[in-house]
Amino acid sequence: MRRLEELFPFLASLEGRPYPFYKDLKGIWRGDGFDLRFVHVQGDPFASPSVVEVRYPAMAAARLRVFAHPVGQVAVEDFLLRALKTRFRNLPHVGGSGHSGRVFVEVESPKVLRRAGAHLSPQGLYLRFRVGLPASGRRILGKEAARLFRALADRLRGFLEELEVEKLLAHVHQAEDFAHIQERLPQRGLVAFVGEGAILPRESGVSQRPLKGAVPFQSPPSLRVSFRVPHKGEVLGMGLPEGLTLITGGGFHGKTTLLEALVHGVHPHIPGDGREWVVTHARAQRVQSEDGRSVVGVDLRPFVHDLPLGQDTSFFTTEDASGSTSLAAAILEALELGAKVLLLDEDTSATNLLVRDARMQALVRRETLTPLLDRIGDFKALGVSLVLVVGGVGDYLDLADTVLLLEEYRPREVTALAKAVAQAHPTGRAFGEPHHPLRVVPRTPFPESFDPRRGRRARVKGRGLRELAYGEEVVDLSALDLFENAQVRALGAWLQRLWRLADGRTPLARLVERALVEAEDLFGLEETPELAEVRPLELGAAVNRLRSLEVRRVEE
Ligand code: ADP
Ligand code: MG
């Protein structure tokens, strides 16, 4: 083992050498109070930057064990990566080719997520980051490298001692309080909680920062609930009950913003985000229409039956789904994966799957679609709740358990009024006798579905939040709710793991849960510090969008 002081002269001695000489950095450099380890050394200045790990010994890390709940540990690790990112700000400028001199600590969103870049254990703490080792063309800039690493070492020294403990505690307590509420939503008969004063809108469509000057959330008195949480004590807010909830109101009064906040609320947020007290059922999922997606072997009969020319929909497969069939598939797939709350916005849902009104019922006799409206009772029987944003479709008023009306971003509960309106303005539509029970037929995928090879080599690469290059294809993830590139990478890693785990017998839902448990080691993967947790619902949704997917029905 070499000493950290030797690192700087060593780097300087590489001056002018060809880039591969950097490979000698690999291994541990022992410092005072921490070690640096070069985990991966890039092959050239344009390749993915090198992975460096800083390790603090158990003694130094012991004071970070300030959590009582597993999510608290995740929060400590999340906090440390954010703090490291801040600590590495304004490093001396080091130029050169490609990524020369650039330092990356991967945290992209205000979500508290389990991340591969940090891990606290009884043995100590490690944090991983990337550094572009400097070069001019393919020649090492050794003196610049020495200067950069001296600066990094200076920042890492005293890092743990100088942490803002108050902030750390706030971060951890927030996440633990969040988990406390989330775990108790089902027993309270709720699908979501939105705390008093929450700031829901974001600065812009591309920003995750809270909108300045926004109207703080105010819960309607009739839906106000309180939770006694371990750290903050009592918190008040709106509790959305199970069943069918409608979020309605005029255009631009904040309907989508509220739904969006619920979508994000499956994960804890950092203090200051504005959505800290938005807590959504852990098994909630947004579903939407997605023209052109692929669907494989879904029994669509609960929503689509008797296609022209006798096409069967009990094992529906298409490379190019329509608005309605894609939404039907998304709903049934979510149920198959164990979703308990479905979040839908009229704006992104095919109208013909939402409703068929009296006039269309009279005119079109040979209808192949059963709209969601005719299945509300079945969802209740399954114990699955729906939160639906509606601006134009009033037919749901009769069936809703809770109706929220947003006016200037303030929700009112208008369930009784909605019932009265429904009585005064009957729709005249006949509630259809569904052709087929609402039942999910589990599917089991074949292992070849997950073969990521293209030619002889595996090709798995995220492209922003919306696409994953996987083997021969590009998987469209735009309908999934992913918040960081690190989650897209994680999906790629877990899909590859499914390749090994799939046996042609295990149903998809179980396989996905198993992959996430058995592939825990992925969080320890040294060479990729950029992995962040995804839920089984997202992993399953990615599987369902693989064009290479092949399944068979599991008959029970
Ligand atoms: P809707 O879905 O009802 O048409 P949106 O949710 O899209 O409305 O909101 C319309 C606009 O109002 C958006 O630009 C959003 O950022 C803004 N907005 C939403 N909620 C608030 C709020 N609480 N305070 C201020 N502006 C808000
Ligand atoms: Mg809207």
Image: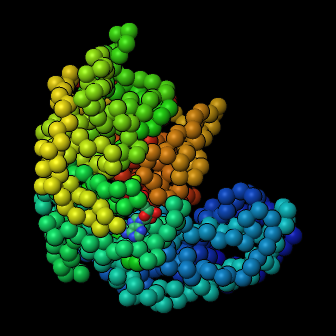
Q: Position of residue 219 (x, y in %)?
A: 23, 70
What is the quadrant of residue 235 in the picture? bottom left
* Horizontal arrangement in the rendering, residue 364 relative to residue 427 (left or right): right
User: Is 209 located above or below residue 257 in the figure?
Assistant: below
* Horizontal arrangement in the rendering, residue 526 relative to residue 144 (left or right): left
Q: Is residue 522 visible?
A: no
What is the quadrant of residue 150 in the picture? bottom right
What is the quadrant of residue 42 in the picture? bottom right
Taking depth in this image into account, of 156 and 299 the one nearest to the observer is 299
Q: Quadrant of the N terminus?
A: bottom right
Q: Position of residue 118 (x, y in %)?
A: 47, 69
Q: Is residue 13 visible?
A: yes
Q: Position of residue 34 (x, y in %)?
A: 53, 81
Taking depth in this image into account, of 413 and 57 the one nearest to the observer is 413
Q: Quadrant of the C terminus?
A: top left
Q: Position of residue 71 (x, y in %)?
A: 31, 68
